[in-house]
Every structure is written in structure tokens, then in C-alpha cells.
Image: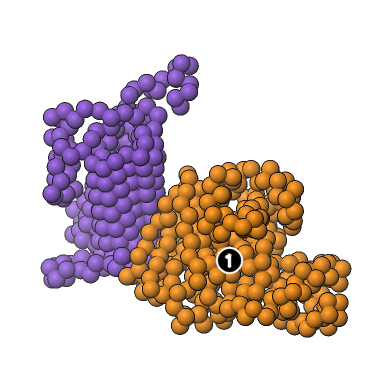
Amino acid sequence: MPATPMSKAEREQGDARVFDLSQHSLRELNEALHKLTPGSNETAWEVLNPKGSHSVAVGVDQPITIDVRGSVGYYCAGMNDGAAITVHGSAGPGVGENMMSGLIVIKGDASQYAGATGRGGLLVIEGNASSRCGISMKGIDIVVHGNIGHMSAFMAQSGNLVVLGDAGDALGDSIYEARLFVRGKVESLGADCIAKEMRPEHIELLQGLLDKAGVTGVKASEFKRYGSARKLYNFNIDNADAY
Amino acid sequence: MCGIVGLFLKDKALEPKLGAMLSEMLVSLSDRGPDSAGIAIYGAASGNEAKITVQSPKPDRDFRGLDAELAKAIGAPVSVAVKSTHAVIRTTPDKVDAAREVLQTLRPDIRIMGAGEAVEIYKEVGLPEAVVERFGLRAMTGTHGIGHTRMATESAVTTMGAHPFSTGADQCLVHNGSLSNHNNVRRELIRDGMKFETENDTEVAAAYLSNRMAHGKNLGEALEGTLSDLDGFFTFVVGTKNGFGVVRDPIACKPAVMAETDQYVAFGSEYRALTKLPGIDNARVWEPEPATVYFWEH
């Protein structure tokens, strides 16, 4: 998708630090981001010409905003701890891997294992996510406007995965305590993952997540909830066939 | 790892730039595989000429006088165009099998990279940039092509272990991944008359497709068969005389991105490989689905 140009308001704001990856190396960008300390005035950053680069804005640990204008490669915004990072394009594998806190928004699609092992924060994917979305998630919230691929939320431990579209094969295989909300159809459920009742507290939780992710025109009641049947927590020889 | 690329042109105006575009795509993925690299380029087939791309470890010795000796042996006109360690031998289509046979005795050290009416295949050990330079690939014209940069896992780093692998006329294949049942499939294919040059797993995938197409399947059907008959990790990009296909195994852990505009269909292991293509910002860009066959034909 074409990179979204800065809005007039953003340009007039004028204080964003612009980093052009066609002029500077990725390492320079990430070093500059890592040098930021609490209270820094450089709270708005813009990254130009990412052109599929790997590891853009990984390991940011200050509450700044970063707008990446274009598509990125592997591991964008990994380990994010508090920043609000928007990719105005699509993201390669492993976007937001192990996020601790903060917000990541992908305007396009995300490749495999988006949000893998994430411990906190919110990852919003406005397009589709491919396979293994939220694999081993440990507290992160993920909201996908489109569809997700197979083996998503594999061994998911905690957090919430919200999918407005459909889910691929083996959703939530070997899941622990994460909650999965899917509005469309689920191709198949993985081992030990079952459909569960949507109780009022789940509607409330889901509505809060939809609001936080800026989703409008969609009701929490349109989703189904999936989670763990809790039969595979500990190895039991009687369940050997289920693994 | 390994990096693979493919480019299928719809717009004839881009044909003079095919080599340059494909080379750029491949070089951008150098860090996915520094061992060896290769490109197969398809030019327009004229119908009255066939090409055999050959490689020699001693090109000065093996290619000298080859045109005259081969022409005499097969009784047909032969031309030999040398490019570094490779040479493209041109003759009439009905003499290709005879030429291949005779080459084994005329020049025992020569290895055949591929043959057909349209395809030329260049591959060597080294970085993509070095391979592109060595064979002047940027200057090549054509309708479609595929390329590969290798990080070896299954067999030795040699010219013959580099991709693309060609096992049938105008057919070739590049692969990212590794196959686990290749020995068994190779044995079955040998029983059905297929010949192998290496111990490499990818050569088995290429031969599998050639074998299925020889049994009357089209490219799409042959690719469909890989999903049930080949075990392991794979993203394949395949070229035929007038076509270009892509398939990923059901697990689909080997990356793949595709882009399509009115001018071309492009494949890259990563989006990075596509960023210099014309009109990429407005192209339809997507990740090919697992266990799904995609193919285009002219």
C-alpha cells in the first residue's frame, strides 16, 4: 500500500524528528531511539523510506510516538515498552514480538507471528494477519480488523486476541488462559481449545478493547469466545492422543 | 534461510529490463544466503532454435572449438556463446537430446544447467552481486525469470548444488526450505526414468514437477501434487516456457510476499526484494496462502 503522507496538522506541528532511512542507517535510528531518557522533549518521530527494513524501532522504552511511512520487514517494534508506533504500510514477520507495553498500529497487513510472546500493550492490525498471530502471547492484547492465519494463539498464555474477520486452522492449539474473540468463522480449533460462553464480563472486556483499538460499527455481541478446555495443562497419559 | 525471487512480465515494454529488475531483486536478498546464487531467464521462444546452458570448471579448455566438434557430431548447425564459466549452445530443437548425449563424451567435465527453447540458467558459488556481474545478467532481456540466493542446509556448496534446478525442457525451480522425504521420492522418480545430477533435496522437487508434467499434468496440477507428496518445508517458485507458479507448504514458515500490477507479477522472500519495482507503492501486495497454488501463464 502507498505510504500515507503526513496530514497538514502533523506537518504544522513541525516538531517531529524525521529520520530518513534512505539517508541514515537503521542502526543510527535505533541508537537514537535507545538514547532517549524520561522527560525528553523529542516525543514525536517520523521514519521515512523503511522499504522493508528489518528491526525498525525495536526496543523503544520511552512514551514517544513513531510514525513509520511505508512497509517494514522482520521484527518491527519488537520489545516495545511504552511507545505508540504506527506503521503506515504492512509489516513483515514478528511485528511487536515480545511487546511489554504501549501501542503498535499496522495500517496494512502483518505477516506471520505478529505479537508473538507479547507481555503487554495493544497491537492493532488494520488489515489481515497471517499464520501464528499471537503465538505464545503472555498478556498482550491484539486486535485484527481482518482475518488471521493458521496456528494463531498457539500456546497462548494470557491476554486477549480479537479478530473481526475469520480465523484459520488450529486456532488456540494448546492454549492456556488467553481469551480469543472471533467475529467470523473459525476454520478449526486446535487441541484443547473450545468455544465458550460470552458472559457479561466478556462483553464488557471486549467492548473496552474494541473502543481502545478505535473499532466502530461492530458490537461485542457479534463475537464468539474461545479458550482453554484446561485438559492439557499437565501431561496425563490418557490425553496422549490429544497433543 | 535462502532468498528467492520471481518476476513475470505482463507489459512487453519491460522485457528489455527483465535482467536488471530480477538482478536487483536478488541482490537485495543477499543476506538471506551468501553461499551461491543463480538466475533462470526466459526469452521469447522462436520455435526453430533450442538452447542448452552448460557449465564447465575449465571453460577455456572445454568451450574452445566446441561449436565445430558438436556440429559435426550431431550433423546440425551449432553456435556457442560463452559467458564466464557458462556457455549457451544453440542448435535445432530436434537435436537437443543428441547434443546432450554427445556432450558427455566430447566434454566429460561439462555440466548441463538446463535446456529448452526459452530458458537460460546461470548459477555459481558466490554472492548474488558477483554472480550477476560474472554473467552480465543485468543486460538480459526476457519475459519472465526466477532467482535464488542460497544458504545451504541439505547438500554441499557447489555450482551444481545452487538453484535454479532444471529437470525438464524449459522447466526450473527455486526453493526455500528443506525436504525430509527427498530420498524416497528420488528413488521413485528414478524408477520412473528420471535422472539426477546431485544429492540435493530441491532437485527432487524439480524432478517431481517435471515428471508429473511429463505425465500430462499442467503446472498448476503438478504444483498441487507437491502438497501431498513432498514432506518438509518449502516455498517453491517455478518457471516454465510460458508460465510462472508459486506454492507454499501447509505450515508456511518460509516467508513469501507477492505483488501484482498491470505490468507484472512479482515474488520475493521479503518485501525488501520488491521495493524497487516500478509502481510498487500502488501494487496489490499480499502474502500467498499456505497450501495454495498460484500460477500465471502467457
Q: Position of residue B58 (x, y in %)?
A: 79, 72
Q: Secondary structure at mark 1?
A: loop
Q: Position of residue A208 (x, y in %)?
A: 14, 40
Q: Position of residue B163 (x, y in %)?
A: 62, 61
Give the residue displayed 37% in from the left and 21% down from the top.
A231
Figure colour scheme: by chain
Q: Nearer the viewer, residue A93 or A85?
A: A93
Give the residue displayed 46% in from the left and 52% down from the top.
B292
Give the residue displayed 50% in from the left and 68% down from the top.
B297
Q: Can residue B229 be seen in the rendering of this structure?
A: yes
Task: Determine which residue is flagged by label 1.
Answer: B240
Q: Position of residue B207 (x, y in %)?
A: 66, 55
Q: Nearer the viewer, residue A36 or A45?
A: A45
Q: Residue furthest front?
A: B216
The quadrant in which residue B55 appears is bottom right
Instruction: Indicate left or right for B231 with A140 as reference.
Output: right
Amino acid found under the numbered disc labelled 1: Thr
The chain whose colour is orange is: B
The quadrant in which residue B239 appears is bottom right
Q: Is residue A239 above or below residue B260?
A: above
The chain whose colour is purple is: A
Instruction: Indicate left or right for A89 with B194 as reference.
Output: left
Q: Is residue B62 above or below residue B171?
A: below
Question: Crowding at label 1, few (<14), some or many (≥20) Cα neighbours within 10 Å?
Answer: many
- Which corner quadrant holds the N terminus of chain A? bottom left
